[in-house]
Image (tube, rainbow, N blue to C red):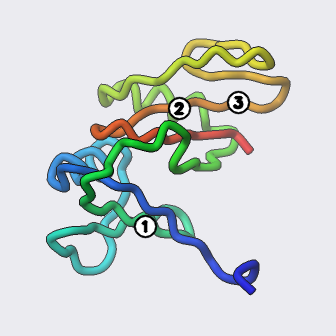
Amino acid sequence: MLGQRQAIATVAVRDLAAAKQFYNGVLGLKQVGAEGEEAVVYATGAATLIVYRSQFAGTNKATAVTWNVGDDIDNLVRDLKSKGLTFEHYDMPMMKLEGDVHVDGEMRAAWFKDPDGNIHGIVNR
């Protein structure tokens, strides 16, 4: 039933203006469609990301959105850091930390938070 349908990621935020500055200004996402008072929709690859106002913003303690960035992960980490983004470092027994990138064999991943504490990840596959 739903296996043939496209999913849309959604992220709750408290301050929509601050979120817009982060998602557009720092992450470089392009707003698509009309903006409402409670939500903004961004294009991200072939998918969309809905950022909406909620009193429950930042309460998820797990990764909310992950981008597959391929071999460009190290360049993206460097570029995002230059925009003031801080990357999270986690103690994962199977992974070693190389700068801000967690590595397990061929897999490379990095995590960061938005202004509300929502966790986002980028991976090379």
Q: Nearer the viewer, mark 1 or mark 2?
A: 2
Q: CA distance from mark 1 to mark 2?
A: 20 Å
Q: Nearer the viewer, mark 3 or mark 2?
A: 2
Residue 115 sits in quarter = top left
- Amino acid type assigned to the residue bearing label 1 in the image: Ala
Where residue 25 sits in the image (x, y, percent)? 26, 46
- Amino acid type assigned to the residue bearing label 3 in the image: Arg
Q: Residue at image x 17%, y 50%?
A: 15
46, 50: nearer the viewer: 50
> Does 56 sit above or below residue 117?
below
Which quadrant holds the N terminus?
bottom right
- Amino acid type assigned to the residue bearing label 2 in the image: Trp
Q: CA distance from mark 1 to mark 3?
A: 24 Å
Residue placed under numbered mark 1 in the picture: 43
The mark that comes first in sequence, 1 or 3, is 1
Residue placed under numbered mark 2 in the picture: 111
1, 82: nearer the viewer: 1
Q: Which mark is residue 107?
A: none
Q: Badge 2: few (under 14), some or many (20 or more) residues near its Cα, within 10 Å? A: many
Q: CA distance from mark 3 to mark 2?
A: 11 Å
Left or right of residue 26, residue 44 in this image: right
Q: Which mark is residue 108?
A: 3
Where residue 78 sits in the image (x, y, percent)? 47, 25
Q: Badge 3: few (under 14), some or many (20 or more) residues near its Cα, within 10 Å? A: many
Label 2's element?
A: strand
